[in-house]
Image (cartoon, rainbow, N blue to C red):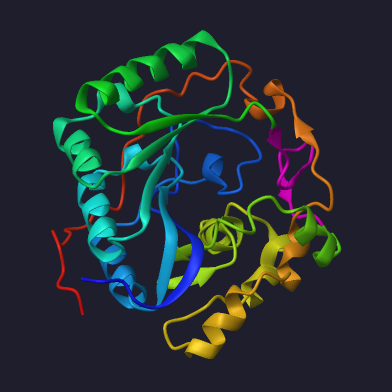
């Protein structure tokens, strides 16, 4: 079925809240969260939006998407609903070598580009990622390695461990933003300007963020009731008041700050939670 709707550069689908790593300053707050979105819920979101938006690229992301127990279903749903978009999955790559044939087959059949984020040169990371890329090569799955040695602070961190938003000039923060052209996010059947705004409500409701973040509850994402005119206005590249939570100028994070446990050891999957029965595929409306 041909895609119709309004063209956009990119759309992210945050399918897993938690991660097998505990990187500080993650824009998805993944260090502080756990759980995932079940596939039948994601299918409802896709059914709502696939005729309204045409992303050049759709990215399945987390957290760590390889932690999702229904990942093959999600990949196939994404390809079904946005069959002309580039399909990408971003992962830290540490769990690739443990994946089932079902996951690998789904990656191949959906022509998903696996983007492996390399956060450090430490052998315990690079060796696991190398094992994963060997498996991808064996199956003929497309992949790339993205070097992210330069990690940026996306929130303020007190000595007590409390995380706080910035109080920036929204326009300056927007001008400084490096994801504004590519990271529009679909979550809870609504479209958010960026993953941080999308993940905020879940983090806040889970009690992971303090009262300093409450004002973000006033943020209005794009909802299914929006008209075409409202959609076009929303996707215009301009700052929102809530952009003030990000810095006007990014500070780089040292590796010790990024991995506060000094030596990252959380390389194995966390236990998944909130798994619900899912639909294999739903009819295109």
Q: Is residue 135 left or right of residue 170?
A: left
Is 74 magenta? The answer is: no
Prevalent SS, magenta region: loop
Residue 188 visible to the viewer: no
Q: Which residue range is magenta in the image?
A: 151-166
Q: Is residue 137 above or below residue 253?
A: above
Give the quadrant of residue 14: bottom left
Q: Indicate the quadrant containing the N terminus: top left, top right, bottom left or bottom right.
A: bottom left
Q: What residue sits 64% from the left and 58% below the top?
A: 180
Residue closer to the observer: 114 or 13: 114
Q: Is residue 166 left or right of residue 179?
A: right
Q: What residue sits 44% from the left and 46% below the top?
A: 62
User: How far from the left and from the top, in percent, is residue 204?
Assistant: 58, 60
Q: What residue sits 74% from the left and 25% below the top?
A: 254
Q: Is residue 270 above or below residue 261?
A: below
Q: What residue sits 69% from the left and 30% below the top?
A: 150
Q: Is residue 256 left or right of residue 168?
A: left
Q: Indicate the quadrant containing the C terminus: top left, top right, bottom left or bottom right.
A: bottom left
Q: Could you tell me how many numbered marks the image carries? A: 0
């Amino acid at each position: 079925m041909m895609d119709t709707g309004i063209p956009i550069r990119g759309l992210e689908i945050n399918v897993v809240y938690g991660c097998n790593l505990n990187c500080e300053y993650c824009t998805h707050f993944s260090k502080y969260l756990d759980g995932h979105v079940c596939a039948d819920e994601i299918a409802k979101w896709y059914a709502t939006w696939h005729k309204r938006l045409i992303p050049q690229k759709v990215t399945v992301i987390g957290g760590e998407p390889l932690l999702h127990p229904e990942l093959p279903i999600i990949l196939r749903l994404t390809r079904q609903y946005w069959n002309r978009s580039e399909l990408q999955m971003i992962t830290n790559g540490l769990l690739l070598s443990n994946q089932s044939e079902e996951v690998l087959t789904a990656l191949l059949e959906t022509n998903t580009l696996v983007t492996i984020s390399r956060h450090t040169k430490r052998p315990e990371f690079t060796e696991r990622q190398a094992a994963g890329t060997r498996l991808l090569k064996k199956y003929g799955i497309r992949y790339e390695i993205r070097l992210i040695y330069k990690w940026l602070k996306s929130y303020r961190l007190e000595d007590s461990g409390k995380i706080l938003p910035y109080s920036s000039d929204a326009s300056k923060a927007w001008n400084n933003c490096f994801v504004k052209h590519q990271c529009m996010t679909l979550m809870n059947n609504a479209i958010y300007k960026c993953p941080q705004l999308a993940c905020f409500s879940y983090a806040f409701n889970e009690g992971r963020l303090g009262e300093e973040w409450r004002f973000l509850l006033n943020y209005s994402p794009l909802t299914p009731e929006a008209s075409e005119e409202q959609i076009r206005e929303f996707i215009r590249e301009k700052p929102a008041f809530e952009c003030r939570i990000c810095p006007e100028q990014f500070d780089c994070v040292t590796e010790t700050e990024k991995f506060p446990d000094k030596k990252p050891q959380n390389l194995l999957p966390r236990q998944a939670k909130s798994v619900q029965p899912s639909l294999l595929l739903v009819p295109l409306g």
